[in-house]
Image: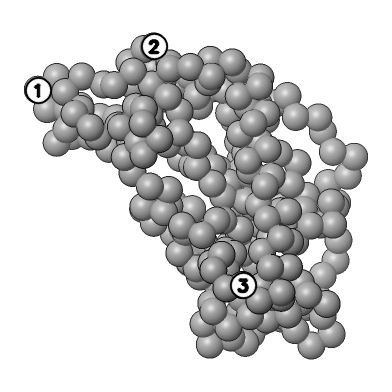
């Protein structure tokens, strides 16, 4: 039985959202970020796994709920016919790949953009509605299902408050990576095994982490007033209204 359960319907996504509501955070569908897992360079891989931090790695991209549990993880996969066909048959998330590229080719983005299983827009105020969205940092593409901070240059006071409140929720994924590394000290150094084995080890760690997170007192879903209409012309306008709400 898996301990990482990707939301399959509206109720599942609402449950994730409630983990943030209970903590008086932005009611998001999850916080998204990537972590570089240090590994021994796979044979014949050249600089493919060499990241901007200066070591060999693959990327663990994860969506996390307000309880610090993994909702979805993307570790990449490796398929190879033989040692001479390594690069051409490679599928995965090597360290040289940035988080946004991995997200853009992920199941998560497909589900969010399709929207069929996501909750409807809800009233955040008496006359302002918001669609359901995840939160990520500035490298990810802004969309109606992904909200990110404003750039750091020449921020207005309102944009600074928006960024701070967004960060208060987004930091959950960073805390989760920290808890994972604290529980499994192997992540403090290079994993000295094959790439395939390293993927399996980190996958197991993520599942074990979820099992070790204490259960919450309540899994009930508060009632919310829904709306069938998306009222914004684009994601930028949506973010402006979200900024207004977070500054009230």
Q: Which residue is mark 3?
A: 155
- Image quadrant in which you'd find residue 57: top left
167 w.r.t. 96: above or below:
below
Q: Which residue is mark 2?
A: 192
Per the model, the C-alpha gap separating discs 1 and 2 is 22 Å
For label 2, the SS is loop
Can residue 226 be spotted in the picture?
no
Q: Which circle, 1 or 3, is nearer the viewer?
A: 3
Q: Which residue is mark 1?
A: 84
Q: Which circle, 3 or 2, is nearer the viewer?
A: 3
Looking at the picture, tell me which residue is in the foreground, 174 or 152. 152
Locate the C terminus by quadrant.
bottom right
Q: Earlier in the sequence, mark 1 or mark 2?
A: 1
- Image quadrant in which you'd find residue 158: bottom right
Specify few, some or many for label 2: CA neighbours under 10 Å numbering under 14, 14-19, or 20 or more: few
- Residue 200 lies, in percent from the top left, at 44, 21
State yes or no: discs 1 and 3 in contact (Cβ < 8 Å). no
């Amino acid at each position: 039985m898996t301990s990482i359960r990707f939301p399959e319907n509206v109720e599942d996504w609402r449950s994730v959202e409630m983990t943030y509501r209970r903590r008086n955070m932005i009611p998001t569908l999850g916080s998204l970020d990537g972590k570089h897992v240090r590994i021994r360079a796979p044979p014949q891989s050249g600089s493919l796994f060499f990241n901007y931090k200066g070591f060999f790695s693959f990327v663990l991209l994860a969506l996390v709920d307000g309880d610090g549990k993994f909702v979805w993880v993307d570790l990449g996969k490796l398929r190879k016919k033989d040692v001479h066909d390594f690069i051409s048959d490679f599928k995965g998330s090597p360290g040289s790949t940035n988080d946004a590229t991995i997200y853009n080719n992920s199941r998560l983005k497909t589900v969010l953009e399709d929207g069929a299983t996501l909750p409807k827009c809800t009233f955040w105020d008496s006359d302002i509605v918001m669609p359901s969205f995840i939160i990520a940092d500035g490298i990810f593409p802004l969309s109606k299902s992904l909200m990110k901070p404003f750039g750091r240059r020449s921020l207005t006071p309102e944009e600074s408050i928006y960024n701070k409140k967004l960060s208060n929720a987004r930091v959950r994924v960073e805390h989760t990576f920290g808890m994972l590394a604290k529980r499994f000290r192997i992540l403090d150094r290079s994993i000295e095994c094959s790439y395939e084995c390293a993927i399996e080890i980190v996958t197991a760690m993520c599942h074990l982490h979820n099992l070790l997170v204490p259960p919450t007192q309540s899994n009930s879903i508060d009632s919310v007033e829904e709306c069938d209409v998306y009222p914004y012309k684009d994601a930028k306008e949506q973010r402006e209204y979200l900024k207004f709400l977070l500054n009230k």
